[in-house]
């Protein structure tokens, strides 16, 4: 069991590190700001552990850190006692960064990565810390390899994709950076999308490419008398099972997507909507493609599914409500989906 002192120190470090990170993050790196959410979840989990651990209520067994430096010392001692604590190394890395000790932050993040070498979050964090510790804060070849490994596991990992685009711009590859960032427009919120679009258009301008076309609501594709959709679009009707309606999280998001059967997890078309007003209809077409090189109309067959996410994250997570995936083709009638499962 993790020692109470470590948990208290961990909570303090998480809060202090978040206070440090959040201040400049949303202003300078809008997509990277999503990493702060992970830190907040971690801090919440640590707080729950403190409250839920009877020993934490015993003042004789608790010495709360009096400063960030004191908290770091406690955490370092705990990790010396038990170095196999991934979250401990992550917290220590953030705490070092809060003190301006970028090289130490890099080393601590690498210790965490060694314990879970395929974790995309850790790969993105280690790459970022490596860049922060480098001259001129540049992503070197090893950091870029970490980011590509993260995206190989989770193609729409937002921080990894954002950082890879930064690395590509640093390497004078603006066209590649724009291409790396463009899929994120389909899954981020409207406010973040505006900032991201500016960065993409800036990169496209450096590459001699025109800016992205202005966003506009796609017109609904015509539907025949038999209910069949025109080639290149798929009409989807989404219902929510009554037993899940009462459990619908506030401000949840609905993702309706089409993907290649047996292919990569990245969708070929996706729409994000507020999870309300069920049943509802969605038209998926080429305008919903997150990847310029792969359009819905290029595929003869896809599978369509719907998912409700409390976090608003496009990547599936435990606790999401979702439907069974159904096959669809260019000549398919409207697809009926019922969200009636909870993801485990």
Image (cartoon, grey):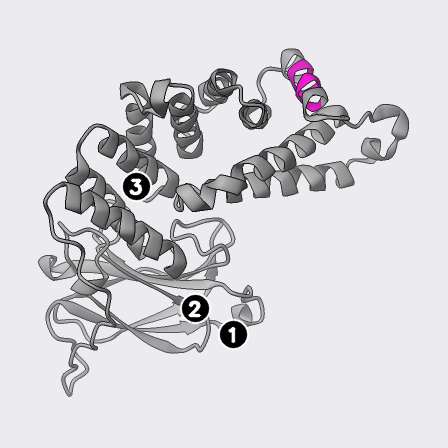
Q: Position of residue 127 (x, y in %)?
A: 38, 26
> In the image, is 190 to the left or to the right of 70?
left
Q: How many marks?
A: 3
Residue identified by numbered label 3: 155
> Who's the residue at 16% across and 85% down the image?
226
Element class at badge 2: strand
> In the image, is 221 to the left or to the right of 145?
left
User: Closer to the camera, 342 or 211?
Assistant: 211
Q: How crowded is the residue under tag 2: few (<14 C-alpha within 10 Å), some, or many (20+)? A: some
Front tag of 1 and 3? 3
> Who's the residue at 68% across and 21% down the image?
69
The mark nearer the N terminus, 3 or 2, is 3
Compared with 320, 143 (above or below) is above
Q: Position of residue 184 (x, y in %)?
A: 30, 50
Residue identified by numbered label 1: 242
Looking at the rendered image, the quarter that the N terminus falls into is top right
Q: Which residues are magenta?
A: 71-77
The reply to whether dot 1 and dot 3 touch (C-beta < 8 Å) is: no
Q: What is the number of the mark on residue 176?
A: none
User: Closer to the camera, 129 or 297?
Assistant: 129
The mark nearer the N terminus, 1 or 3, is 3
The reply to whether dot 1 and dot 2 touch (C-beta < 8 Å) is: no
> In the image, is 20 to the left or to the right of 177?
right
Residue 73 drawn in magenta: yes
Residue identified by numbered label 2: 274
Compared with 133, 273 (above or below) is below
Q: Position of residue 271 (x, y in %)?
A: 31, 63
Task: Quote the CA–CA distance across marks 1 and 2.
Answer: 18 Å
Q: How crowded is the residue under tag 1: few (<14 C-alpha within 10 Å), some, or many (20+)? A: few
């Amino acid at each position: 069991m993790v020692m109470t002192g470590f948990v208290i120190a961990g909570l303090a470090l998480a809060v202090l590190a978040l206070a440090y990170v959040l201040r400049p993050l949303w202003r300078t790196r809008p997509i990277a700001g999503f990493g702060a959410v992970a830190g907040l979840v971690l801090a919440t989990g640590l707080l729950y552990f403190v409250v839920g651990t009877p020993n934490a209520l015993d003042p004789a067994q608790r010495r709360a850190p009096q400063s960030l430096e004191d908290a770091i010392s406690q955490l370092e001692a705990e990790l010396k006692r038990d170095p196999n604590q991934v979250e401990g190394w992550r917290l220590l890395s953030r705490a070092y960064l809060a003190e301006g000790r970028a090289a130490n932050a890099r080393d601590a993040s690498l210790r965490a990565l060694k314990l879970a070498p395929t974790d995309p979050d850790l790969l993105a964090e280690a790459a970022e810390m490596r860049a922060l510790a480098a001259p001129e804060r540049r992503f070197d070849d090893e950091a870029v390899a970490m980011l590509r490994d993260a995206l190989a596991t989770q193609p729409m990992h937002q921080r990894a994709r954002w950082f890879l685009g930064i690395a590509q711009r640093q390497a004078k590859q603006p066209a590649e950076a724009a291409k790396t960032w463009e899929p994120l427009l389909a899954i981020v919120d409207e406010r973040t999308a505006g900032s991201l679009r500016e960065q993409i258009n800036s990169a496209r301008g450096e590459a001699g490419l025109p800016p992205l076309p202005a966003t506009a609501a796609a017109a609904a594709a015509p539907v025949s008398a038999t209910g069949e959709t025109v080639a290149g679009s798929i009409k989807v009707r989404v219902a929510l099972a009554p037993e899940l309606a009462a459990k619908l999280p506030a401000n949840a998001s609905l993702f309706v997507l089409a993907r290649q059967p047996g292919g990569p997890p990245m969708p070929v078309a996706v729409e994000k909507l507020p999870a309300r007003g069920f049943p509802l209809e969605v038209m998926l077409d080429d305008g919903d493609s997150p990847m310029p090189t792969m359009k819905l109309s290029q595929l003869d067959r896809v599978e369509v599914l719907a998912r409700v996410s409390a976090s608003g994250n496009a990547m599936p997570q435990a606790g999401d409500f979702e439907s069974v995936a159904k096959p669809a083709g260019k000549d398919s009638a409207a697809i009926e989906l019922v969200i009636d499962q909870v993801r485990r």
